[in-house]
Protein backbone atom coordinates (compact mmCIF):
# COMPACT_ATOMS: atom_id res chain seq x y z
CA UNK A 1 0.00 0.00 0.00
CA UNK A 2 1.10 3.63 -0.24
CA UNK A 3 2.64 5.11 2.87
CA UNK A 4 0.52 4.41 5.98
CA UNK A 5 0.59 8.03 7.09
CA UNK A 6 -1.52 7.43 10.20
CA UNK A 7 0.89 4.77 11.45
CA UNK A 8 3.91 6.89 10.68
CA UNK A 9 2.40 9.97 12.29
CA UNK A 10 1.75 8.09 15.52
CA UNK A 11 5.34 6.77 15.57
CA UNK A 12 7.11 9.99 14.63
CA UNK A 13 5.09 12.12 17.04
CA UNK A 14 6.24 10.11 20.08
CA UNK A 15 9.54 11.99 20.46
CA UNK A 16 11.18 15.04 18.88
CA UNK A 17 14.40 13.18 18.03
CA UNK A 18 15.04 9.84 16.33
CA UNK A 19 18.52 8.51 17.15
CA UNK A 20 20.20 7.28 13.95
CA UNK A 21 22.24 4.29 15.07
CA UNK A 22 25.25 2.72 13.38
CA UNK A 23 26.19 -0.26 15.54
CA UNK A 24 27.90 -3.59 14.91
CA UNK A 25 28.53 -4.87 18.46
CA UNK A 26 25.39 -6.84 19.29
CA UNK A 27 26.27 -6.87 23.00
CA UNK A 28 25.79 -3.09 23.04
CA UNK A 29 22.36 -3.18 21.40
CA UNK A 30 20.22 -3.70 24.49
CA UNK A 31 22.01 -1.31 26.86
CA UNK A 32 22.09 1.38 24.18
CA UNK A 33 18.38 0.99 23.45
CA UNK A 34 17.60 0.96 27.18
CA UNK A 35 19.55 4.18 27.71
CA UNK A 36 17.81 5.93 24.83
CA UNK A 37 14.35 4.78 25.91
CA UNK A 38 15.07 5.73 29.54
CA UNK A 39 16.12 9.16 28.33
CA UNK A 40 12.82 9.64 26.53
CA UNK A 41 13.73 8.65 22.97
CA UNK A 42 11.81 5.43 22.19
CA UNK A 43 11.93 5.68 18.38
CA UNK A 44 15.20 4.12 17.19
CA UNK A 45 16.50 4.01 13.61
CA UNK A 46 19.10 1.27 13.16
CA UNK A 47 20.95 1.68 9.88
CA UNK A 48 21.76 -1.31 7.70
CA UNK A 49 25.38 -0.28 7.49
CA UNK A 50 27.08 -2.91 9.62
CA UNK A 51 27.33 -6.70 9.24
CA UNK A 52 25.34 -7.24 12.46
CA UNK A 53 22.73 -4.53 11.94
CA UNK A 54 19.84 -7.01 11.69
CA UNK A 55 20.88 -8.72 14.94
CA UNK A 56 21.18 -5.30 16.59
CA UNK A 57 17.61 -4.51 15.51
CA UNK A 58 16.33 -7.82 16.87
CA UNK A 59 17.91 -7.15 20.24
CA UNK A 60 16.71 -3.56 20.42
CA UNK A 61 13.17 -4.59 19.45
CA UNK A 62 13.05 -6.72 22.64
CA UNK A 63 13.60 -3.67 24.86
CA UNK A 64 10.40 -2.55 26.56
CA UNK A 65 9.18 0.71 25.10
CA UNK A 66 11.53 0.70 22.10
CA UNK A 67 10.05 1.16 18.64
CA UNK A 68 12.71 0.09 16.19
CA UNK A 69 12.95 1.05 12.55
CA UNK A 70 15.49 0.20 9.89
CA UNK A 71 17.60 2.83 8.17
CA UNK A 72 19.63 3.02 4.98
CA UNK A 73 17.00 0.79 3.33
CA UNK A 74 17.90 0.50 -0.34
CA UNK A 75 15.88 -2.41 -1.77
CA UNK A 76 13.13 -5.01 -1.30
CA UNK A 77 15.46 -7.46 0.47
CA UNK A 78 16.30 -4.84 3.09
CA UNK A 79 12.57 -4.32 3.59
CA UNK A 80 11.80 -8.00 4.11
CA UNK A 81 14.77 -8.32 6.48
CA UNK A 82 13.53 -5.29 8.42
CA UNK A 83 10.11 -6.86 8.96
CA UNK A 84 11.69 -10.16 10.03
CA UNK A 85 13.90 -8.30 12.53
CA UNK A 86 10.86 -6.74 14.22
CA UNK A 87 11.04 -3.27 12.70
CA UNK A 88 7.96 -1.04 12.81
CA UNK A 89 9.08 1.43 10.13
CA UNK A 90 11.81 1.90 7.53
CA UNK A 91 13.89 4.87 6.40
CA UNK A 92 15.65 5.25 3.03
CA UNK A 93 18.23 7.85 2.03
CA UNK A 94 16.36 8.68 -1.17
CA UNK A 95 13.48 7.79 -3.46
CA UNK A 96 13.64 5.69 -6.59
CA UNK A 97 10.78 4.13 -8.56
CA UNK A 98 11.95 0.68 -7.48
CA UNK A 99 12.11 1.44 -3.78
CA UNK A 100 8.67 3.06 -3.81
CA UNK A 101 7.28 0.03 -5.70
CA UNK A 102 8.89 -2.33 -3.18
CA UNK A 103 7.47 -0.38 -0.23
CA UNK A 104 3.97 -0.82 -1.67
CA UNK A 105 4.28 -4.56 -0.92
CA UNK A 106 5.53 -4.24 2.68
CA UNK A 107 3.32 -3.97 5.74
CA UNK A 108 5.37 -1.37 7.63
CA UNK A 109 5.65 2.25 6.50
CA UNK A 110 8.61 3.78 4.68
CA UNK A 111 9.95 7.25 5.46
CA UNK A 112 11.85 8.03 2.27
CA UNK A 113 14.53 10.67 1.92
CA UNK A 114 14.24 13.63 -0.43
CA UNK A 115 16.45 16.65 -1.05
CA UNK A 116 14.50 18.78 -3.55
CA UNK A 117 10.94 20.02 -4.17
CA UNK A 118 10.73 17.81 -7.27
CA UNK A 119 11.56 14.70 -5.26
CA UNK A 120 9.06 15.73 -2.59
CA UNK A 121 6.39 16.13 -5.28
CA UNK A 122 7.25 12.74 -6.79
CA UNK A 123 6.85 11.07 -3.39
CA UNK A 124 3.67 13.02 -2.69
CA UNK A 125 2.17 11.82 -5.98
CA UNK A 126 2.79 8.26 -4.76
CA UNK A 127 0.87 8.90 -1.54
CA UNK A 128 3.68 9.94 0.78
CA UNK A 129 2.88 12.63 3.34
CA UNK A 130 5.92 12.18 5.61
CA UNK A 131 9.41 12.54 4.15
CA UNK A 132 12.94 12.65 5.46
CA UNK A 133 14.87 15.76 4.36
CA UNK A 134 18.35 14.38 3.75
CA UNK A 135 21.14 15.30 4.13
CA UNK A 136 19.50 18.23 5.86
CA UNK A 137 22.38 20.54 6.74
CA UNK A 138 24.29 19.93 3.51
CA UNK A 139 21.15 20.79 1.56
CA UNK A 140 20.56 24.16 3.18
CA UNK A 141 19.06 23.21 6.50
CA UNK A 142 16.11 24.82 8.23
CA UNK A 143 15.74 27.78 5.79
CA UNK A 144 15.01 25.32 2.97
CA UNK A 145 12.32 23.51 4.94
CA UNK A 146 10.84 26.83 6.00
CA UNK A 147 10.64 27.85 2.33
CA UNK A 148 8.85 24.58 1.46
CA UNK A 149 6.19 24.96 4.15
CA UNK A 150 3.86 27.12 2.09
CA UNK A 151 4.12 25.56 -1.42
CA UNK A 152 4.23 21.98 -0.07
CA UNK A 153 1.89 22.56 2.85
CA UNK A 154 0.60 18.98 2.92
CA UNK A 155 4.05 17.43 3.40
CA UNK A 156 5.71 16.95 6.81
CA UNK A 157 9.42 16.38 7.21
CA UNK A 158 11.93 14.66 9.44
CA UNK A 159 15.25 16.40 8.67
CA UNK A 160 18.34 14.26 9.20
CA UNK A 161 22.04 14.71 8.55
CA UNK A 162 24.47 17.06 10.26
CA UNK A 163 22.04 18.05 13.02
CA UNK A 164 23.04 18.73 16.64
CA UNK A 165 20.97 19.80 19.64
CA UNK A 166 21.05 23.50 18.80
CA UNK A 167 20.11 22.96 15.16
CA UNK A 168 17.43 20.46 16.14
CA UNK A 169 15.68 23.11 18.21
CA UNK A 170 15.46 25.39 15.17
CA UNK A 171 14.04 22.64 12.95
CA UNK A 172 11.53 21.64 15.60
CA UNK A 173 10.19 25.20 15.60
CA UNK A 174 9.07 24.85 11.97
CA UNK A 175 5.43 24.05 11.21
CA UNK A 176 6.32 21.29 8.73
CA UNK A 177 8.74 19.33 10.94
CA UNK A 178 7.46 16.45 13.07
CA UNK A 179 10.84 15.29 14.41
CA UNK A 180 14.53 15.28 13.53
CA UNK A 181 17.00 12.43 13.13
CA UNK A 182 20.58 12.43 14.30
CA UNK A 183 23.48 10.66 15.91
CA UNK A 184 24.74 13.39 18.26
CA UNK A 185 23.02 11.65 21.18
CA UNK A 186 25.51 8.77 20.87
CA UNK A 187 29.03 10.24 20.70
CA UNK A 188 31.65 7.76 19.50
CA UNK A 189 33.65 7.98 22.72
CA UNK A 190 30.58 7.30 24.86
CA UNK A 191 29.76 4.24 22.76
CA UNK A 192 33.36 3.02 22.87
CA UNK A 193 33.36 3.12 26.68
CA UNK A 194 29.79 1.85 27.21
CA UNK A 195 28.96 5.15 28.87
CA UNK A 196 25.21 4.55 28.93
CA UNK A 197 24.64 7.17 31.64
CA UNK A 198 26.03 9.90 29.37
CA UNK A 199 23.94 8.71 26.44
CA UNK A 200 20.84 8.64 28.64
CA UNK A 201 21.57 12.24 29.71
CA UNK A 202 22.00 13.36 26.10
CA UNK A 203 18.79 11.55 25.16
CA UNK A 204 16.92 13.25 28.00
CA UNK A 205 18.12 16.67 26.84
CA UNK A 206 17.10 15.81 23.26
CA UNK A 207 13.68 14.60 24.38
CA UNK A 208 12.97 18.07 25.75
CA UNK A 209 13.98 20.05 22.67
CA UNK A 210 10.50 20.70 21.36
CA UNK A 211 9.62 24.11 22.72
C1 LIG B 1 22.98 9.33 8.66
O1 LIG B 1 22.51 8.94 7.63
O2 LIG B 1 24.09 8.95 9.07
C2 LIG B 1 22.14 10.24 9.45
O3 LIG B 1 21.75 11.27 8.64
C3 LIG B 1 22.77 10.71 10.69
O4 LIG B 1 23.48 11.83 10.37
P1 LIG B 1 24.35 12.53 11.49
O5 LIG B 1 25.37 11.52 11.92
O6 LIG B 1 24.95 13.68 10.73
O7 LIG B 1 23.42 12.95 12.59
Image (cartoon, grey):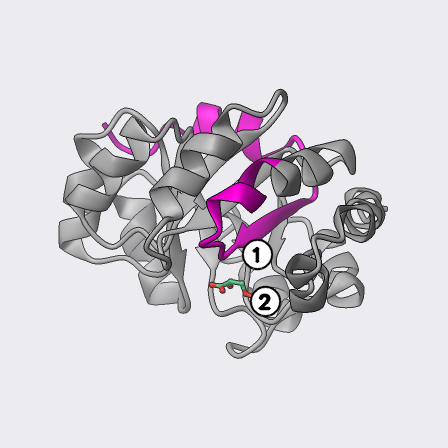
Q: Quadrant of residue 140?
A: bottom right
Position of 98 with respect to 23 (left or right) is left
| Residue in the foreground of this view, choosing between 67 and 141 | 67
Task: Please tell me which residue is depicted at 69% across the width and 40% down the height of the picture.
Answer: 36
- How many residues crowd mark 2 within 10 Å: few (<14), some (14–19), many (20+)? few
Give the numbered dot on residue 198.
none
The x, y position of residue 128, in whole percent, is 36, 41
Range of residues picked out in magenta: 1-30
Q: Is residue 175 above or below residue 187?
A: above
Q: Is residue 189 above or below residue 67?
A: below
Asked whether the residues under the numbered discs 2 and 1 touch, taking CB atoms below 8 Å apart as contact, a structural biologist would say yes
Q: Is residue 112 above or below residue 115?
A: above
Q: Element under label 1?
A: loop
Q: State which quarter of the image contains the N terminus.
A: top left
Q: Element under label 2?
A: helix
The x, y position of residue 160, in whole percent, is 55, 61
Position of 51 with respect to 100 (left or right) is right
Q: List the residue tagged with mark 2.
A: 147
Q: List the residue tagged with mark 1.
A: 150
Disc 2 from disc 1: Cα separation: 7 Å
The x, y position of residue 83, in whole percent, is 30, 29
Task: Please tell me which residue is depicted at 17% across the width and 30% down the height of the picture.
Answer: 105
Say whether mark 2 is within 8 Å of ligand 1: no
Amino acid sequence: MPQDTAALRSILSLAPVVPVIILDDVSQARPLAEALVAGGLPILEVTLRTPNALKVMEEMAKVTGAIVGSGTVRNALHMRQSVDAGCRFMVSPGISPRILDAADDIGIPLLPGIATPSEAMTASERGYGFLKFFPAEANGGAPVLKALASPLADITFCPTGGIDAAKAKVYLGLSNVICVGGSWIMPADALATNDWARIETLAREASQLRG
